Image: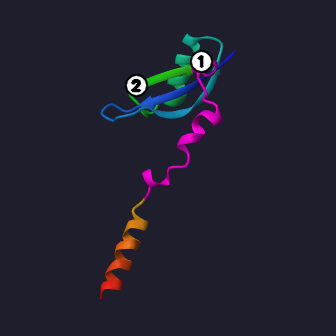
Amino acid sequence: MHTYEVFLKKDGRDEFRHAGALDAANDALAEVHARETYIRRAEGDRLWLVRRDHVIVADVDFVAPNADKPHRHHDGAAVAARRKANREASE
């Protein structure tokens, strides 16, 4: 038995979304099982199956240098607070 990760895409949307995982003896059975489990109600138009043992998982130390960059992902709250403080100081 192999474990497969299932990804679905609705036509017209940009990316595939992870839908879940399933176990199957081979690729053909995995396709049938995924169709019957994940897209029987038209949740997606495209289906990807990836055997879990083929997924490359990056080591935590490899990813770590990019973890400490909060300036790249913010909601603008710090900028808004600074501008508000500047306005109040100039009044």
Return the residue at label 1. Answer: 54
Specify whether residue 62 is painted magenta.
yes
Would you place residue 21 above or below residue 76 in this image? above
Residue found farthest to the right: 1
Nearest the viewer among 2 and 59 is 59
Residue 3 placement, left or right of 43:
right
Which badge, 2 or 1, is on the more N-terminal residue? 2
- Describe the element under mark 1 as helix, strand or loop: helix
Residue 46: which disc?
2
Would you place residue 53 above or below residue 57 in this image? above
Examine the image and state in which quarter residue 77 appears.
bottom left
Would you place residue 88 above or below residue 56 in this image? below
Examine the image and state in which quarter residue 86 appears.
bottom left
Specify whether residue 80 is painted magenta.
no
Quarter placement of the C terminus: bottom left
Find the distance from the CA under tag 2 to the CA under tag 1: 20 Å
Tell me the residue at 43%/67% (across/down). Answer: 78
Region of the chain picked out in magenta, as a range: 51-74
Q: Say which amino acid is labelled 1.
A: His
In percent of width and height, residue 64 lies at 60, 40
In percent of width and height, residue 73 lies at 44, 52
